[in-house]
Amino acid sequence: MSRVTRIALGAMAGIAGVALGVTSMTGCSASSELRTASPDETDAASSGAAPLPDSTTPSPPSGPDTQTIDGHTFSAIGPGDCATNAMVAIDREGPGKLLGELTDMGASEYAAGPVGYDEHGRIETYTVQPGDALAAIGERFCIDYITVGIHNHRMPPGKTIQPGDILVLRPDPTVTWSPDDGYAAPNP
């Protein structure tokens, strides 16, 4: 049996298993007849509610706890004790961009390393120390740690931060980023 055939059979078996699990959870048997509800049997029709819109594109969340910067909507409340939030916008094969503003909340047990600044005195980098944790670094600088990890190619599996790593917190918008880029070790 070819590799492609084995993969296809495995996928079909997985789909059948999921379908059987779903039908048993809803009280149907695997041999139940599939029936489509008529418009008068739907919840919207019986309750008098307006029909669903034709568009299935979700609208971005909005409200006092969200912010939209350059088309990216994310939480306005930062991690930990942060009153604001920032994130690194990552577009495949494009430059990374800082959305929001970084705030240094001060060193903590798991984020005690030195900070690097750009020529304008703004936070730009962070040097990882032994015992540091990416989530704590995010809390220290009021930034989404997941986007920092992805931008710096330091997300698991197997790509965790290491002492001496220099994490870019404020990406250079003129430098193209790619998920396929290798991680370049910092220059001492």
Image (cartoon, rainbow, N blue to C red):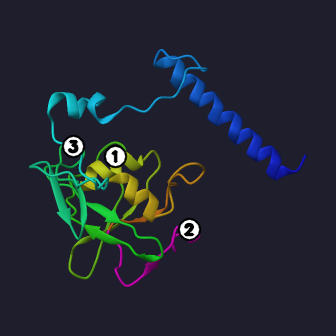
What's under tag 1, amino acid-wise?
A: Ala
156, 56: nearer the viewer: 56
Secondary structure mainly formed by the magenta segment = loop
Q: Distance between the residues labelled 1 and 2?
A: 21 Å
What's under tag 2, amino acid-wise?
A: Tyr
> In this picture, which residue range is highlighted in magenta?
170-188
101, 184: nearer the viewer: 101
Q: Residue 41, how many percent across, how many down? A: 30, 28
**Circle 3: is it few (<14), some (14-19), or many (20+) Cα within 10 Å?**
few
- Read off the residue under disc 2: 183
Residue 112 appears in view: no
Extreme residue in the bottom direction: 174
Of circles 1 and 3, which is in front? 3
**Circle 1: is it few (<14), some (14-19), or many (20+) Cα within 10 Å?**
many
Please give the name of the residue rendered at 66% of the width and 34% of the height, measured from the top-left corner: 14
Q: In which quarter of the image is residue 150?
A: bottom left
Q: Earlier in the sequence, mark 2 or mark 3?
A: 3
Horizontal side, residue 37 vs residue 14: left or right: left
- Read off the residue under disc 3: 51
Q: Distance between the residues labelled 1 and 3?
A: 46 Å
